[in-house]
Amino acid sequence: MDSLFLAACRGQSTPRPPLWLMRQAGRYLPEYREIRSNVTFLELCKTPALAVEVTLQPIRRFGFDAAILFSDLLIPLEAMGLEVVFTELGPSLPAPVRSEEDLARVRVFDPWESTPFVYETIRLLKDQLGDTPLIGFAGAPFTTATYAIEGKTGKQFIETKKLLNRDPKTAHRLLALIESATRSYLLAQVAAGAQAIQIFDSWVGVVSPEEWDEFVLGPTKTLVAAVKATGVPVIYFPNGATTLLDRISKVEADVYSIDWRLPLGQARARLQEGASGTFAVQGNLDPALLLGREDRLRLQVAKIVGEGGGRGHIFNLGHGIYPETPIASVEALVRAVRGQ
Ligand code: CP3
């Protein structure tokens, strides 16, 4: 029998929504900070025994219904030949890609050769997770491209917008290269044992409808189709883009992860306008509610569970959990979702 999580991914009814949290492994957990105090973030990502341990920490503590591989969105960019450094302020790429000449520095890579630690981590996790399904992930082509172009987490994404609109040919080529590299990276995750794949489009909320149609839909849909062809469900997370949901469902993902800016029921209806088949939804609690009062949290959880309708709904946050989140709030969330 499928786990609650995989059943919901397939659009089936579940006695309660399965629950996991974006960024569930990380700094809000004292046991993560303990391990992290001895190694750099990149070392943590690249040392399978440690990556396994921090992946398992939130599962042990909260019994979430799915685990997510501990890694980072920027790992494939490094494998594509771009230098990546992590500072206190987040990731940065000293030599961003902003012209046709810069494209020469970007290469499609052999995943088994360049990122073997990812697949070793997955294999080790599969031995230890038992019945808990494992989610693999990567950035969507657009979001990964924003890091290549901006050289950091963007604010206005001016450099990205400039490339799209000054040199659309180079933008298309960069997106196609990233899609191709991400495709082999994700197919290898599935081969190693990942049972679902989430594609994070964290910054796609900055594109216009026209830019979505011209630049984003094509490579995203190609990537989703390639992963779906393996038989594992694909979750697509278009953060901040609820105004584009009718266009977004044309990527034909199995599951859409919804941010907190629209009620889940309305999100489903907007997705339905562009969808050619059935789909499930994931979300969509504002992670900031975990910083507030428990009564307000419980009220919103009940509302979301109601809108989820007990069918094809995975409970999650609308974006990653904040590092300042109290453990007690996560415990309260787990109880609320389980109807306790
Ligand atoms: O979800 C999980 O528990 C798995 C691990 C995971 C991390 N990053 C660990 C991480 C996942 C799925 C990601 C994805 C990721 N990385 C995204 C997409 C999700 C999203 O939040 O939109 C993005 C945009 C990144 C890029 C990134 N990595 C940024 C912007 C930062 C700095 C900001 C921050 O939160 O510190 C990181 C660092 C990072 N990735 C940390 C962790 C646990 C913190 C590093 C540390 O321990 O110092």
Image: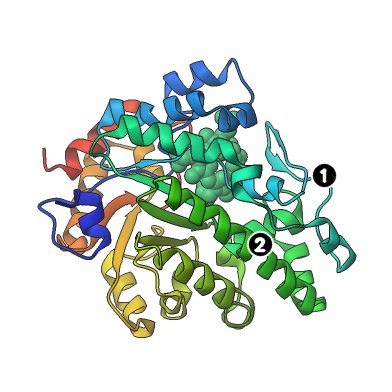
Numbered disc 2: secondary structure: helix
x then y, percent, for residue 140: 55, 61
Between disc 1 and disc 2, the foreground one is 2
Disc 1 to disc 2, how far (Cα)?
Answer: 18 Å
Q: Is residue 327 above or below residue 131?
A: above
Residue at the spot of label 2? 178
Badge 2: residue crowd in 10 Å (few <14, some 14–19, many ≥20) = many
User: Given the image, on which type of amino acid does mark 1 rest?
Assistant: Pro
Please state if 42 lies on the left or on the right of 260 as rendered.
right
x and y, in percent, of residue 73 in the image: 58, 47
Q: Secondary structure at mark 1?
A: loop
Quarter of the rendering containing residue 150: bottom right
User: Residue 18 appears at what percent x and percent y?
Assistant: 22, 48
Which circle's residue, 1 or 2, is located before the other in the chain? 1
Question: Looking at the image, is 278 positioned above or below residue 44?
Answer: below
Q: Label 2 sits on what residue type?
A: Ile
State the residue position of label 1: 94
73 sits left or right of 103 in the view: left
Q: Residues within 10 Å of mark 1 (few under 14, many from 20)?
A: some
Residue 55 visible to the viewer:
yes
